[in-house]
Image (cartoon, rainbow, N blue to C red):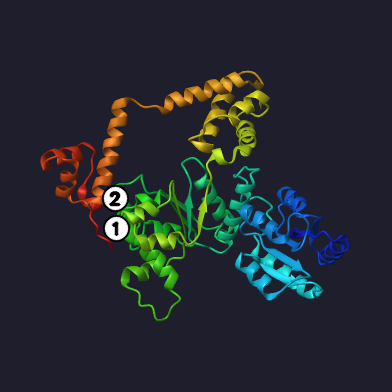
């Protein structure tokens, strides 16, 4: 049997609070009660209800102020506001700010239950947690992200994940796949930086029977580092998305490549370590494609913005690597005070290193700090390697900005064409791959 939805009811009138709670409990809901906005916020953070029903006029924190706090932490949470002082301007102002519904007291009990049922249908379902089991968190921000991800999964939305390397974008994409109706269908992960441009373009060719469209048909296609797609590959991805968006329109005439793409049924999840706005503004990423991908955008926070997760993640990784071992309290404190540019992936590496390098059951602060220093040292590269990486990145940017025009790129770099071609050859860069040839 499915678990009943939990509803938080807030009112400073004890009789009204009891009446609403009783009515909702009789309808089968789990009910929590709070007699003030401040108490409601504490209860919300502890219990994560699927809906909040609050009186408008209360003491220090009124219903709209409470709503603003709730919306900041959980934008998808439906909130119903009740008031004995309701007017049309009040209702309009509240709904414009995102309040789900507005009822004037005295209200009809059946109407309240109807609106509650409508809100619960929009609120992500309670989880038995299998789909999200690999996402370890106690963070309110992460819980809201998972709430949004669940809705993305249920509604089969094309989605763009934005977040730094190691923060968990791939893990989140797999969780979305598991949470939705495509969970028994393929999950195809494709890194847009692992292939030469021409090979990736062929992988994304809808007419390729061995390509990504065929492999992912019916399931999820996950594109890592989507901003690295060449212009041709961007055009082919755009073809698929446009065909799926418009295939139900009988007046939309599909061209041959779009017809092939529209025969597939794929949920596309794209990821980027940074927002794509700058790439769009600079002409390196097609604006039409960006708008289709970013209609739903989920931001995966870096570990530095969810520090409360560090102890639970560390315990989880340690339990997997060396069951029975524990972290000393000051070792946990050292982790919480650490710098995590590599995010969750870096934390996992640290824990795995200290778990295999320590014979004692309790891992000390000294061991943790030593591992953190060693990994920091390993992350530094030789000066010549740094120069080479910078030079290659510079040349790529140059070719992207000039659309592969060697003469223009050489002029900007203040090099003659012969020297510039030698630079390109040294870094195995072909200007043809940067031509603006959208198909």
Give the camera-side residue of 266 and 96.
Answer: 96
Q: How crowded is mark 1: few (under 14 residues within 10 Å), some or many (20 or more)?
A: many
Give the camera-side residue of 89 and 168.
Answer: 89
Q: Quadrant of residue 318?
A: top right
Indicate the quadrant containing the C terminus: top left, top right, bottom left or bottom right: bottom left
Give the camera-side residue of 403 and 196.
Answer: 403
CA–CA distance in space, label 2 to label 1: 9 Å
Q: Mark 2 points at which residue?
A: 197
Verify CB contact (< 8 Å) between mark 2 and mark 1: yes
Q: Quadrant of residue 351?
A: top right
Q: Please give left or right for residue 371 compared with residue 210 in the image.
A: right
Indicate the quadrant containing the N terminus: top left, top right, bottom left or bottom right: bottom right
Above-or-below relation of 345 to 84: above
At which x and y percent is residue 29?
79, 62
Q: What element carries label 2?
A: helix
Question: In the rendering, which numbered label is found on residue 232?
Answer: 1
Q: Please give left or right for residue 107 compared with residue 341 in the image.
A: right
Q: Quadrant of residue 64?
A: bottom right
For image coordinates 56% across by 57% down, the residue present is 183
Q: Please give left or right for residue 211 compared with residue 333 in the image.
A: left
Question: In the rendering, which numbered label is found on residue 186?
Answer: none
At which x and y percent is residue 424?
20, 41
Q: What element carries label 1?
A: helix
Of all residues, the one furthest to the right in this rendering is 15
């Amino acid at each position: 049997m499915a678990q009943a939805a939990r509803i938080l009811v807030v009112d400073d009138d004890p009789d009204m609070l009891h009446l609403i709670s009783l009515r909702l409990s009789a309808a089968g809901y789990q009910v929590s009660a709070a007699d003030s906005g401040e108490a409601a916020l504490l209860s919300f953070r502890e219990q994560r209800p699927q809906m909040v029903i609050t009186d408008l006029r209360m003491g220090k924190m009124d219903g709209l102020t409470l709503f603003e706090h709730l919306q900041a932490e959980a934008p998808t949470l439906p909130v119903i506001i009740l008031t004995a002082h309701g007017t049309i301007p009040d209702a309009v102002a509240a709904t414009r700010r995102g309040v789900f519904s507005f009822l004037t007291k005295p209200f009809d009990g059946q109407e309240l239950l109807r609106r509650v049922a409508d809100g619960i249908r929009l609120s992500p379902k309670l989880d038995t947690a299998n789909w999200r089991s690999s996402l370890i968190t106690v963070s309110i921000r992460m819980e809201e992200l998972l709430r949004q991800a669940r809705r993305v999964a249920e509604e089969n939305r094309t989605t763009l994940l934005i977040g730094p390397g190691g923060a968990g974008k791939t893990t989140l994409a797999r969780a979305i796949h598991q949470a939705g109706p495509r969970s028994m269908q393929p999950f195809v992960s494709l890194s847009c930086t692992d292939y030469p441009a021409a090979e990736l373009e062929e992988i994304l060719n809808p007419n390729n029977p061995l390509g990504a469209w065929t492999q992912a048909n019916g399931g999820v296609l996950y594109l890592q580092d989507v901003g690295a797609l060449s212009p041709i590959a961007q055009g082919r991805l755009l073809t698929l998305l446009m065909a799926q968006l418009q295939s139900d329109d009988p007046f939309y005439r599909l061209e041959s490549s779009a017809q092939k793409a529209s025969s597939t049924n794929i949920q596309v999840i794209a990821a980027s370590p940074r927002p794509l706005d700058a790439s769009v503004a600079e002409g390196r990423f097609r604006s039409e494609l960006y708008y289709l991908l970013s209609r739903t955008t989920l931001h995966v926070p870096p570990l530095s913005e969810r520090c409360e997760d560090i102890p639970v993640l560390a315990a989880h990784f340690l339990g997997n690597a060396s069951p029975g071992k524990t972290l000393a309290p000051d070792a946990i404190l050292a982790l919480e005070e650490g710098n995590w540019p590599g995010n969750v992936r870096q934390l996992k590496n640290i824990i795995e290193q200290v778990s295999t390098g320590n014979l004692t059951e309790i891992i000390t602060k000294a061991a943790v700090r030593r591992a953190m220093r060693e990994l920091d040292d390993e992350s530094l590269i030789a000066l010549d390697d740094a120069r080479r990486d910078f030079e290659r990145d510079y040349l790529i940017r140059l070719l992207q900005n000039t659309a592969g025009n060697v003469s223009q790129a050489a002029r900007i770099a203040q090099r003659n064409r012969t020297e510039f071609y030698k630079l390109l050859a040294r870094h195995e860069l072909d200007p043809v791959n940067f031509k603006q040839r959208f198909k």
